[in-house]
Amino acid sequence: MENRARKVEIVLWSIIMPGAGQWLDGKYFKGAVFILGQFALNAQANFNAAIASSLLGDTANAVQVIDYNWFMFCPCLYFLAAWDAYKEAGEKEKSLSFLPFVCAGYFGTVGIIYSSTFKPFGVLLGPVWLPMLGAALGGAIGCIIKASINKCGRHRRHEC
């Protein structure tokens, strides 16, 4: 159980700060590359100003201050770093362990694309909340796909 808790810790730190999971796992160079990449993306995308505006309830301003050309790369970097940290923490042998991370990155990116216009129930979620919801949905879908494929694979082996 301790190993599983360590993996969860590493992934959560990596999602909060890409590269932190690698750093905790002793992969300092790789961690530094992810951390510097995240800082560069945040600065270029003006993400911190968008976060502040969103948390203060000014979603329209968050849409205005974010640079979508740079921001589109954020989910990819975040979930690549999280998957890499997870894999390096001991999940190398698991089949399709990348799927939840890839799906989270993809759905988070789709959330960014629609974040300036999509208004469920008339509420603009903006460039912070919609990508987060998309990433959570994508991660869940990735887990379901992974479990389904792995389950089918086990059944086929027994049939042969």
Image: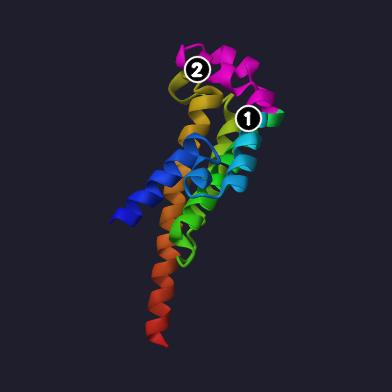
Label 2 with label 1: CB-CB less than 8 Å: no
The residue located at (43%, 46%) in the rendering is: 10
State which region is magenta.
Answer: 42-68
Of residues 135 and 91, the one drawn nearer to the viewer in this rendering: 91
Q: Residue at (43%, 23%) from the top-left corner?
A: 121
Whole-percent x, y for residue 119 in the image:
51, 23
Q: Amino acid at mark 1?
A: Phe
Q: Which label's residue is closer to the chain start, 2 or 1?
A: 1
Q: Residue furthest left?
A: 1
Q: Residues within 10 Å of mark 2 (few under 14, many from 20)?
A: many
Residue occupied by mark 2: 54
Query: Disc 2 or disc 1, which is closer to the eye?
Result: 1
Is the residue 112 above or below the residue 105 in the image? above
Residue at left offset 54%, top offset 42%: 107
Task: Name the element at disc 2.
Answer: helix
Locate the N terminus by quadrant. Answer: bottom left
Q: Is residue 18 above or below residue 57?
A: below
Q: How far across and how far down the image is residue 125, in percent?
A: 49, 23
Where is residue 101 drawn, in percent x and y? 51, 49
Amino acid type assigned to the residue bearing label 2 in the image: Ser
127 in relation to 132, above or below: above
Q: CA distance from mark 2 to mark 1?
A: 19 Å
Overall secondary structure of the magenta stretch? helix
Instruction: Assign a secondary structure to mark 1.
Output: helix
In the image, is 129 to the left or to the right of 36? left
- Residue located beneath label 1 in the image: 39
